[in-house]
Image (spheres, rainbow, N blue to C red):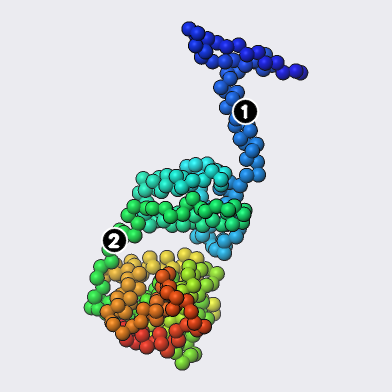
């Protein structure tokens, strides 16, 4: 059937208010049809156009951490929150304005600026990876986001006196539970609680002239930076604690140093257990690391590069740190740790 169009202006006091268009004997408002046609051509022009969902699929497929449950949960949560605000936008429509609005939305919900940075880091990485795989020659509009209050501590770290750290040591020695033994390892290595708690038994090398623990990747944890993959000499009570955990793991025929925490959230579980136990002392697991670094800073004879090699820092590497075919030796690291041993 042939389509007919009958344009009849409707006027009032010589001013045109609306225009009706008749299609197959049905009248339509011209503005309605105009919007409908515009949306039609827009939707058809976007067929095959990559969107945020395309970026998300690429990120989940290509990221080395894509098998980690926590990674999947975080990436999915941040992506869904963004899409709930703006929809599944075509990638070419993304602007810095979108991430600032997303930031303001999270701030209004009461999220800490440091947490919002984690959201931004994931979303920015998602966009960057999609641009790379789709050959889109463009910088991510989510880069260089400014977040007011970022870096401020919600709870400042209290001063950790030698008296306090000695009390904590005595408390940990009083009952050698797995979490307390991990705390004793932290005491003289400065490592993060997740590093020994999700270590494999083969990471603890006791039949060596200098017993040590390796901090490296496994199926439950990644190392975020190259500097975080390292070996740390075990000295004093830290060595005794590692030996005890090693023997217990051998007895249980486990491949993991602490089988109770051999899971993706094992570090968080161990931290929660220790924090609860040490609450009367106003002490938390991350304070072992702070106390270790405080003891290093209190001396004037410890080179910063070796100290960073022990603690796993190194984001602001100098050219000196980047060059050389070998790292600092276990002998060099042990000499440092023995100077600040508790």
Which quadrant is the N terminus positioned in? Answer: top right
Give the residue at mark 1: 37
Q: Is residue 276 left or right of residue 66?
A: left
Q: In percent of the image, x 35 and y 82: which residue is there?
A: 303
In this rendered view, identify the residue nearer to me: 19 or 149. 19
Q: In percent of the image, x 46 and y 74: which residue is there?
A: 227
Residue 196 point in image, percent of width and height? 44, 75
For residue 2, above or below residue 167: above
In this rendered view, identify the residue nearer to me: 194 or 172. 194
- The secondary element bearing badge 2 is classed as loop
Q: In percent of the image, x 36 and y 85: which residue is there?
A: 336
| Residue that protrudes farthest toward the bottom in the picture | 209
- Of the two numbered discs 1 and 2 in the rendering, the one whose residue sits closer to the viewer: 1
Mark 1: few, some, or many residues within 10 Å (few <14, many ≥20)?
A: few
| Residue that protrudes farthest toward the top in the picture | 13
Residue 232 point in image, percent of width and height? 43, 81
Which quadrant is the C terminus positioned in? Answer: bottom left
| Residue that protrudes farthest toward the right in the picture | 1
Give the residue at mark 2: 155
- The secondary element bearing badge 1 is classed as helix
For residue 246, above or below residue 149: below
Q: In percent of the image, x 45 and y 86: which residue is there?
A: 329
In this rendered view, identify the residue nearer to me: 314 or 171. 314
For residue 73, above or below residue 300: above
Residue 225 point in image, percent of width and height? 48, 70
Q: Examine the image and state in which quarter residue 41 appears.
A: top right
Of labels 1 and 2, earlier in sequence is 1
- In this rendering, does residue 203 appear at all? yes
Q: Is residue 23 left or right of residue 115?
A: right
């Amino acid at each position: 059937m042939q389509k007919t169009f009958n344009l009849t202006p409707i006027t009032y006091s010589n001013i045109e208010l609306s225009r009706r268009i008749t299609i197959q004997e049905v009248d339509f408002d011209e503005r309605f049809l105009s919007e409908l046609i515009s949306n039609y051509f827009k939707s058809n022009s976007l067929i095959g156009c990559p969107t945020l969902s395309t970026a998300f699929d690429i990120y989940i497929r290509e990221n080395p951490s894509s098998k980690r449950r926590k990674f999947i949960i975080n990436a999915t949560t941040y992506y869904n929150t963004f899409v709930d605000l703006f929809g599944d936008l075509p990638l070419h429509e993304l602007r810095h304005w979108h991430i600032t609005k997303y930031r303001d939305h999270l701030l209004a919900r009461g999220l800490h600026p440091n947490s919002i940075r984690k959201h931004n880091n994931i979303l920015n990485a998602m966009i960057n990876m999609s641009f790379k795989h789709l050959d889109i020659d463009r910088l991510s509009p989510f880069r260089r986001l400014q977040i007011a209050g970022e870096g401020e501590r919600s709870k400042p770290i209290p001063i950790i006196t030698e008296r306090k750290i000695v009390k904590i040591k005595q408390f940990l020695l009083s009952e050698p539970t797995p979490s307390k033994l991990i705390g004793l390892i932290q005491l003289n290595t400065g490592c993060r609680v997740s590093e020994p708690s999700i270590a494999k038994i083969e990471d603890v090398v006791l039949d060596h002239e200098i017993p040590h623990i390796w901090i490296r990747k496994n199926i439950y944890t990644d190392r975020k930076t190259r500097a975080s993959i390292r070996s740390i000499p075990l000295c004093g009570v830290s060595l005794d604690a590692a030996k005890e955990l090693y023997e217990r793991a051998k007895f249980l025929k486990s491949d993991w140093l602490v089988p109770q925490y051999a899971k993706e959230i094992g570090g968080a579980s161990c931290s929660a257990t220790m924090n609860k136990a040490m609450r009367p002392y106003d002490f938390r697991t991350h304070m072992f690391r702070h106390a270790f670094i405080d003891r290093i800073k209190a001396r004037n004879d410890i080179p910063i590069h070796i100290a960073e090699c022990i603690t796993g820092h190194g984001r602001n590497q100098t050219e000196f740190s980047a060059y050389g075919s070998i790292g600092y030796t276990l002998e060099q690291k042990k000499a440092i740790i023995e100077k600040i041993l508790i």
